[in-house]
Image (spheres, rainbow, N blue to C red):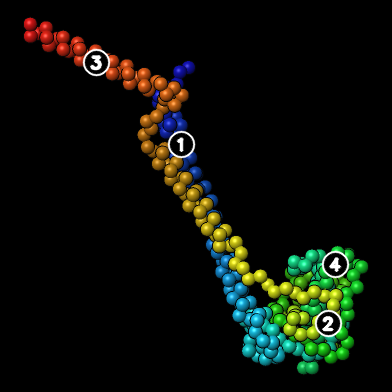
Amino acid sequence: MRMTDAQTEFGGKPDSLSAGSWAILAALTLIVATACVSLGFWQWGRHEARGARNAVVEASYDQAPAPLSTILTTARGDVDAVQWRPVTLTGTYVGEPVLVRNRPIGLGSGFHVLGVLAVPDGSLIVVNRGYLATSLPVEQIDPPLPPAGEVTVVGRIRPAEPDHNRAVTGHQVYTFTPAQVTLAAGVGNSDGVMEASFYVVADPSLGPNDSNELSAIPRPETDQGPHLSYAFQWWTFAAGILGAFIVLFVRERRPARVTLNDLLDPNATQGTSRSAARTKGLDESAEDEEISHQLR
């Protein structure tokens, strides 16, 4: 069966989408575009949050150490406002060392080693003493003991983390949660009052290192990350999807001029044009002869 021009024209009636199909396609286009826009704003929010966090690091990290009590008074309970500030505190370690697992920091496999410091005012403060790089299973690890007697710790204040419903396992925890750390260390209320809102990360570059087996926690990265470029990528996807729908809609509504036969046989159009030209020439010759006959 030979296809007619009406059946083969692009955008012709047989290939056109129905009104219902267009409605469904438009709805899907809007849903996908909206999702892309939302993901873009999510990445933008992460970019802004990263920038705010970096600003705090840059403003606090290189300041001179100050007594912890002074920094806490300045913060007025807002630990986030003074995180990464260098602080000094003096006290005595109590309880057993505690390991934090599954928290790598770019120094290979290992564990953070925490201790609980009892300070003269009766507070119990969790101290991240450093990172123990090892590939041994946790059952074979014998973490270095903290120094005995009164010590001075120089480090940086950090806000405490929620426990995310992870239980204490022996002398191991999964988050920097003071309540869990003191429990894992075997420290009770008789040893003092736990500070639940923050902990301190010891920094050997600012003060004494209590063990050569432990590595210092490195300075946090302050690059902005890829979030801004991801945001623009999602927004570009949204614009591309909407643009593709508009182009498709306009093409569907525009009368088509090219047929499938023309694409399959480019000579057909040229042959038709030549035949039409010859027919026109013959018609003009016949008309000239008729006029000449009447004049005679």
> Which residue bears the numbered disc 3?
281
Q: Residue at x 55, y 62 (%)?
A: 228
Q: Earlier in the sequence, mark 2 or mark 1?
A: 1
**Real-space Cα separation, disc 2 to disc 1, in angstroms:** 75 Å
| Residue 80 appearing in the image | yes
Answer few, some or many: residues within 10 Å of disc 1's Cα (few below 14, many 20 plus, some between 14 and 19): some
**Direction from residue 154 to residue 47 in the image, left or right:** left
> Which residue bears the numbered disc 2?
210
Camera-nearest label, 1 or 3 = 3
**Real-space Cα separation, disc 4 to disc 1, in angstroms:** 64 Å
**Direction from residue 156 to residue 257 in the image, left or right:** left
- Horizontal and vertical percent position of residue 101: 81, 68
**Direction from residue 97 to residue 88 in the image, left or right:** left
Q: What residue type is labelled 4?
A: Thr
Quarter of image, res 18: top left
Closest to the observer, 118 or 89: 89
